Amino acid sequence: MGGFVLGWEETIGNVTVIGRPFSQVSATKGYNKLLVKARINDAVTIARRMATETRNLVSKSMTAAIEMRMGPGPHGLVTTLSPTVEAAVAAHFKLPAPMTQANADDWTDLFKYLNTVYMMISQGINGPLKIVDIPSADKLDTNGSVSLSDAKALDTADPSGLRVAKRGRIHINFHWVTTRTAQRVARTVIHEASHKFVGARDHAYKPNKPNYAALTPKLARTNADSIACFAYYTWKNGAYALD
């Protein structure tokens, strides 16, 4: 079931899964090749749906924010913000909740920005995609990574705040993949895709609670884990469905 797995490469649809030859992860921890292939392909399928549904959710939320900014009409607010989305924005993008008419400009700006972020991620991961094993011993406890030579950060790239990164391959720890659900691996696919396709950075990781809680709204919106966790937890908490 486990043990050393020599280099290999297999393509299913437009997803290529690559086991690196002599990977220190493979040599040290091993993995089940068939399980890795199945889990990654399932995870990519889920991540594609997750990115699309999150963008739809953000678009609807932006409408609610615009209505809130304008104030209720004679029949009140036509579109209301999901409490799950409101809580997720506060948790992962650090805007003060609840959304009110006084702060609706900030919420509208964030949703407009995220609409572009999830569009770029969706376009990226729906194209041909290569998922590669983590290469080296110093990354044994890393879930994933992307090489971003010469890429510019979202918050300094240009006035609009978005720039496509260099096209490094997405690396995921193949041993770790076998210990998590496809939905959890999909979260990591979105995290790494935010590096690859929109130039997001690792300002803080959610498991490091003090650093994650200390993110400012400006840093949070360019933080890969914030982008991935918003998509993952709005699904997990029922704001949208994947089936």
Image (cartoon, rainbow, N blue to C red):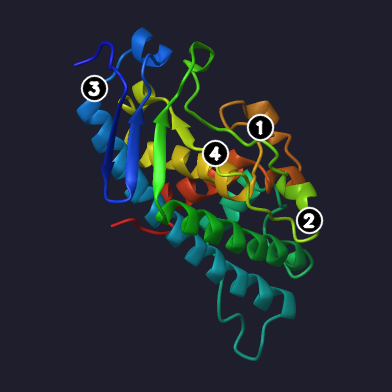
Is the residue marked by circle 3 packed among few (<14), some (14-19), or many (20+) residues within 10 Å?
A: some
Q: Which residue is mark 2?
A: 158
Image location (x, y in percent) of residue 207? 56, 27
Cα–Cα span, label 1 and label 2: 22 Å
Q: What amino acid type is highlighted by mark number 2? A: Asp
Of badges 4 and 3, nearer the viewer stands: 4
Q: Do residues under tags 4 and 3 come within 8 Å of each other at their CB atoms?
A: no
Is the residue marked by circle 2 packed among few (<14), some (14-19), or many (20+) residues within 10 Å?
A: few
The one of 92 and 224 positioned closer to us in this rendering: 224
Residue at x 49% of width, y 16% of height: 136
Q: Which residue is mark 3?
A: 32
Q: In this rendering, does residue 81 appear at all?
A: no
Of badges 1 and 3, nearer the viewer stands: 3
Is 29 left, or right, of 143 in this rendering? Answer: left
Cα–Cα span, label 4 and label 1: 21 Å
Residue 42, compared with residue 24, is above or below; it is below
Q: What amino acid type is highlighted by mark number 3? A: Asn
Residue at x 46% of width, y 37% of height: 188
Is the residue marked by circle 1 packed among few (<14), some (14-19), or many (20+) residues within 10 Å?
A: many
Q: Which residue is mark 1?
A: 204
Image location (x, y in percent) of residue 180? 34, 30
Cα–Cα span, label 4 and label 3: 25 Å
